[in-house]
Amino acid sequence: MAPHSPSASPALGAVTWIVMVAAFGGFLFGFDTAVINGAVAPIREEFELGALMSGFSVSSALLGCVVGAFSGGVIADRVGRQKAMLLAASLFFFSAIGCALVVGVYDLIFWRLVGGIGVGMASVIAPAYIAEVSPSAWRGRLGSLFQLAIVVGIFMAAISNALFADIAGGAAEELWFGLDAWRWMFLSEAAPALIYGLLALSIPESPRYLVSRGKDAAAAKILTDVVGLSGSDAVAAKIEHIQRTINMEARQKLKDLFVSGKLIPVVWVGIGLAVFQQFVGINVIFYYSTTLWQAVGIAEDQALLVQVITTSVNILATIVGILIVDKVGRRIPLAVGSAVMAGGLLMMAVAFSQAVESTATNEFGDVETVVSLPEPWGVIALVSANVFVLGFGATWGPFMWLMLGEMFPNRIRAVALGVASAFNWGSNFLISTLFPQMAELSLVFAYAFYGMSALVSLVFVLKYLPETKGREIEEMQEKAYSTV
């Protein structure tokens, strides 16, 4: 077995700054995926969309995420992590401007796809990079900063959406320079995208990428200055260890994930982890919460406030996850998180089973169905939703991305992380696209489905998930062909 961080004394200041810059991609990840929340209703109205097309306009970005996730690892492996981050930042920037200036639903879908590719790339590049530059003793907390950045991005999207809607008097109302408020919601992403690109220029390459390109001297400097190894012998031993486990001969390919025609077990586990994170329905809360709460009788400004509260809970929960991850490991918190999520989701199903339908005439003179939750079920639904977010934010939110960044051996990490992330985004697309139709059929059915998925994820964690706490990235070679 490989030694644990020989002679390591982490250069905490240097590595924290580098990880924070890499994690800024997570901020854009969260902002880009959540900003659509405040724009769903006005987009549906302006472009006269039905439930299916409305769902697709929201989730189309996730198809781009699949492409970005699948290609991000390959791109990062070919040109380096830093240049891949610059590419992702450019995609975020142009998507923000494009979405703000759309004239129809099809160009909106195109620019959402462009932004989605950036999100997918960030979801692969940042966890891999952070895992590769972080000392093993700090890897859990530093890796979880990526998820913290995601939830902060979601929170800031909620704040900016509420702010623009409040100033304009509604998301569909005109704001500045003849642009509606919902267009400014998209445009506001351009500034952090530009900042991300500039910050990416300030960080070094991953030592593992440098070793894979034969740049041992540059890798040694980063292992000393960032990872914190002291002494030439320790650095040389680390480089030799990386060389033994990394795929030096050729770029990683899909076929590397198979042995004797069968998928390596750890890849199956990574895919399962990625799929379950989405099948619990977390992004329904972040993509559709404003529309959802409006549908049960909460006014637009109050629905946006509810989104702010929910994203605040998510941030606090993520901080809790960061504090515990290197103390108690990954498996047990994930199991507890599954149980808490199941309880919150199933209680939401019970709450929505008490919904009352009535009819009302809208501003256009059309009769439409209005759904409301009688007391105390409205409060119970809100509390249950936040219990679910708390369980997710403290465990499955940060730990899934952390584990995907650290559970695969170097020989297959880039391609395996890309495949698992692609499954994550594909599952996200499926759940998000189908939710409007599931909601029209029955919100009780929708939340019961997510709750049962959470229960199955509990069994999955206990039976199949390996513990990665405290292990060097190179050690994962020994765990790749077995589970738990």
Image: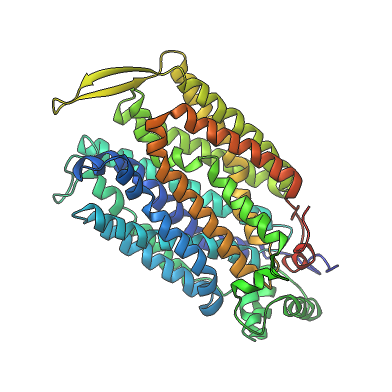
- Reply above or below: 340 against 120: above
Q: Quadrant of residue 12?
A: bottom right
Q: Quadrant of residue 97?
A: bottom left
The colour style of the image is rainbow
Front residue of 42/460: it is 460
- Reply above or below: 333 against 83: above
User: Residue at position x 54%, y 43% from top?
Assistant: 279
Asked whether the viewer can see residue 305, the reply is no
Residue farthest to the right, as pictured: 1
- Reply above or below: 273 against 456: below
Quadrant location of the N terminus in the rendered image: bottom right
- Reply above or below: 81 against 31: below
Front residue of 116/30: it is 116
User: Residue at position x 60%, y 32% from top?
Assistant: 342
User: Residue at position x 48%, y 24% from top?
Assistant: 381
User: Residue at position x 81%, y 80% from top?
Assistant: 233
Front residue of 164/283: it is 283
Residue 274 horizontal side relative to residue 360, left or right: right
The location of residue 31, given as percent across then percent down, is 41, 50
How many numbered circles are shown? 0
Residue 389 horizontal side relative to residue 309, left or right: right
The location of residue 145, given as percent across then percent down, is 57, 53
Residue farthest to the top, as pictured: 375
The location of residue 250, given as percent across then percent down, is 62, 83
Front residue of 26/359: it is 359
Asked whether the viewer can see residue 106, the reply is yes
The location of residue 340, given as percent across then percent down, is 63, 32
